[in-house]
Image (tube, rainbow, N blue to C red):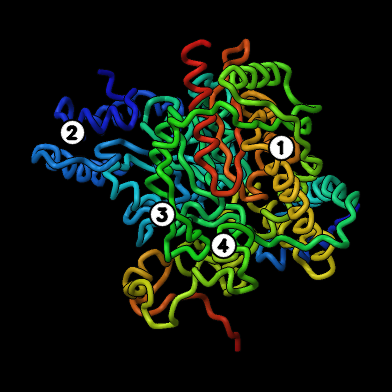
């Protein structure tokens, strides 16, 4: 048994049946981190004491013959935008370099209550703003499949940790594609649930109408188990929906025969790499082979999604990030003489270039005289983009697209051109704007052996269907059929 | 050029950023390039389109509910410590760069 390559259920049952211990699983993953992470850079903080305490609790349960909860003893990693009580949480920013949260993010608390062992906090673009993980204030992350390439972003550390067997699963956050795009680049599964499906209590806010928490995993089943664990109403987050949570794992086994899959030409246009196009077309054929019906749909406002997203996300960010003022918990510049100088110098020294750029753009878009032209306009186009999906989902059960127009690019390749970087999210931002769920699963590799991702988008609160389609594809791909 | 140096200074002021001369020059270039790109939104006629501020009031609640009724599930009685106790003072001050045990401390606000 290779203990860093187990699925959630294999790990849990191995601990339950005393074939291994939660302690050995944790130590095995820490050894893998020790071995690999010097090169990859996926982790910012390890919390060994907390992990070993939890592992011990699980091992005692197993020794007493008590049934273990669904993630009993499973080593997990948490993106460093989620608060962890007593464990440093930086959001990849210097301004939170020393921040020790006094409480746990609900999603993290739910994972731990289900028996998960939190190994540590993963690197990310500063405040989740980026598509390559190069905007981390600490160090970039390298793609475990090819270390000259980026892992994607902003949940690059979480994707890399899972891809390099440094954690069984990880939590990430997705505001414009930040779970699905790195999942695609690193060759793992990444699920963004419906807006409101998972509580964001304890998530460091970037853009509140767009932020989602979701899993990165090695298999679709593992992603479903994690969603099951973290989904559902939380009174601490007023935007978490009051909707029953289905049994996602049981739903995976339902047949996909007869499901209608939409294919939109807007996701296969200029800028899509040929190898990615080819792999995604083959994947769609494979789903047809499983009995799915492919139906052309039109999402005519897709081309307006990136400008819409960058106005709304930056406007919300400029407001959310106003709290970092050097007073209550963030970095404070030294040698300042007045309150106003303290605010400015603390923010100047604490924030990185991309964060400042977005605060500036967002502040501009909200400022008197420009609000209607930019922010309000973008909100109206958001309605149009959402209506496109509502229209399409009258005809189909899910929509299949590439996750990203290219495979992983090289470090430094796009870092000097903000606009080129923004376009890496062109196929993912639409789902964030509409609030619909999306999953990215591996669908082959380029000639250079870089992973390619297939994205499956679903109706609001219908994660079951996209998980089911993803599971059917995964199984067919493994069987080589 | 939509954004001028003066605009950059004004917006930096609103955002409580100082920005070095070099940063301001970079901002001027980047903001103009991004705003040029977002200009394409004006190709769309949105005069009769409602703005969408968020998703929560659109899905996951009964269609028969209107306005603030759609958020009724999220409301609670307005009572002290309605969901959980407030953070103890010590915990609330623990991350402050400067505190005296009772208050956050900041540089002098009023000059005289």
Q: Nearer the viewer, mark 3 or mark 1?
A: 1
Residue that label 1 marks: A426
| Residue B59 marker | none
Residue that label 2 marks: A16
Q: Nearer the viewer, mark 4 or mark 2?
A: 4
Q: Chain of mark 1?
A: A
Residue that label 4 marks: B61
Residue A367: quadrant of the picture: bottom right
The local crowd at label 3, few if under 14, some if 14 to 19, many if 20 or more residues have their Cα within 10 Å, is many
Expressed as whole percent of the image width and height from the top left, the position of residue A408 reads 61, 25
Camera-side residue of A462 and A228: A462
Residue that label 3 marks: A83
* Left or right: where A338 falls relative to B51: left
Q: Chain of mark 3?
A: A
For label 3, the SS is loop
* Left or right: where A338 falls relative to A108: right
Tags 4 and 2 on a common chain: no
Q: Earlier in the sequence, mark 3 or mark 2?
A: 2
Identity of the residue drawn at 55% across and 68% down: A336
The local crowd at label 1, few if under 14, some if 14 to 19, many if 20 or more residues have their Cα within 10 Å, is many
Q: Chain of mark 2?
A: A
């Amino acid at each position: 048994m290779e203990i860093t390559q187990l699925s959630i259920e294999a790990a849990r049952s191995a601990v339950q049946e005393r074939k291994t211990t939660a302690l050995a699983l944790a130590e095995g993953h820490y050894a893998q981190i020790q071995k690999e992470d010097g090169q990859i850079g996926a982790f910012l903080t390890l919390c060994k004491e907390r992990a070993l305490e939890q592992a011990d609790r699980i091992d005692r349960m197993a020794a007493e013959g008590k049934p273990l909860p669904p993630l009993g003893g499973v080593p997990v990693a948490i993106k460093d935008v989620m608060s962890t009580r007593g464990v440093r949480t930086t959001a990849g920013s210097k301004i939170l370099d020393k921040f020790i949260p006094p409480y746990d993010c609900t999603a993290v608390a739910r994972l731990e209550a289900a028996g998960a062992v939190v190994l540590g906090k993963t690197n990310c673009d500063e405040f989740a703003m980026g598509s390559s993980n190069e905007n981390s204030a600490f160090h970039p992350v390298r793609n475990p499949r090819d270390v000259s390439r980026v892992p994607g972003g902003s949940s690059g550390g979480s994707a890399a940790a899972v891809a390099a067997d440094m954690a069984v699963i990880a939590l990430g956050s997705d505001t414009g594609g930040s779970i699905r795009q790195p999942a695609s680049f690193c060759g793992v599964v990444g699920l963004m649930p419906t807006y409101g499906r998972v509580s964001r209590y304890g998530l460091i806010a970037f853009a509140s109408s767009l932020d989602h928490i979701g899993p990165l995993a090695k298999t679709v089943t593992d992603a479903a188990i994690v969603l099951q664990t973290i989904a559902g109403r939380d009174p601490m987050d007023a935007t978490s929906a009051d909707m029953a949570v289905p049994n996602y794992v049981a739903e995976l086994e339902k047949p996909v025969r007869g499901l209608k899959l939409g294919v939109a030409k807007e996701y296969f246009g200029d800028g899509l790499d040929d190898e990615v196009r080819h792999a995604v077309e083959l994947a769609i054929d494979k789903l047809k082979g499983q009995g799915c019906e492919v139906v052309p749909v039109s999402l005519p406002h897709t081309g307006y999604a990136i400008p819409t997203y960058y106005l709304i996300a930056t406007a919300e960010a400029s407001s959310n990030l106003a709290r970092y003022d050097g007073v209550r918990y963030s970095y404070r510049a030294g040698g300042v003489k007045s309150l106003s100088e303290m605010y400015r110098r603390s923010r100047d020294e604490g924030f990185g270039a991309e964060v400042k750029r977005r605060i500036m753009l967002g502040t501009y878009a909200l400022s008197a005289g420009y609000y209607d032209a930019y922010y309000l306009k973008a909100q109206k186009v958001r309605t149009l983009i959402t209506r496109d999906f509502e229209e399409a989902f009258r005809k189909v059960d899910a929509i299949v697209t590439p996750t990203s127009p290219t495979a992983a690019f090289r470090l430094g390749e796009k870092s000097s051109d903000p606009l080129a970087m923004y376009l890496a999210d062109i196929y993912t931002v639409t789902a964030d704007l509409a609030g619909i769920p999306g999953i990215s699963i591996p669908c082959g590799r380029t000639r250079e052996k870089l992973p390619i991702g297939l994205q499956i988008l679903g109706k609001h609160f219908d994660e079951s269907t996209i998980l089911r389609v993803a599971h059917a594809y995964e199984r067919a791909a493994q069987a080589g059929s | 050029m939509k954004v001028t140096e003066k605009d950059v200074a004004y917006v930096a002021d609103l955002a409580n950023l100082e920005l070095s001369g070099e940063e301001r020059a970079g901002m001027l270039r980047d903001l103009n390039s991004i705003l040029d790109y977002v200009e394409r939104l004006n190709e769309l006629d949105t005069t009769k389109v409602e703005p969408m501020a968020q998703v929560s009031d659109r899905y996951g609640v009964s269609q028969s509910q209107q306005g603030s009724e759609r958020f009724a599930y999220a409301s609670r009685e307005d009572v002290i410590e309605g969901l959980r106790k407030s953070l103890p003072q010590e915990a609330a001050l623990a991350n402050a760069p400067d505190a005296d045990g009772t208050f956050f401390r900041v540089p002098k606000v009023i000059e005289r």
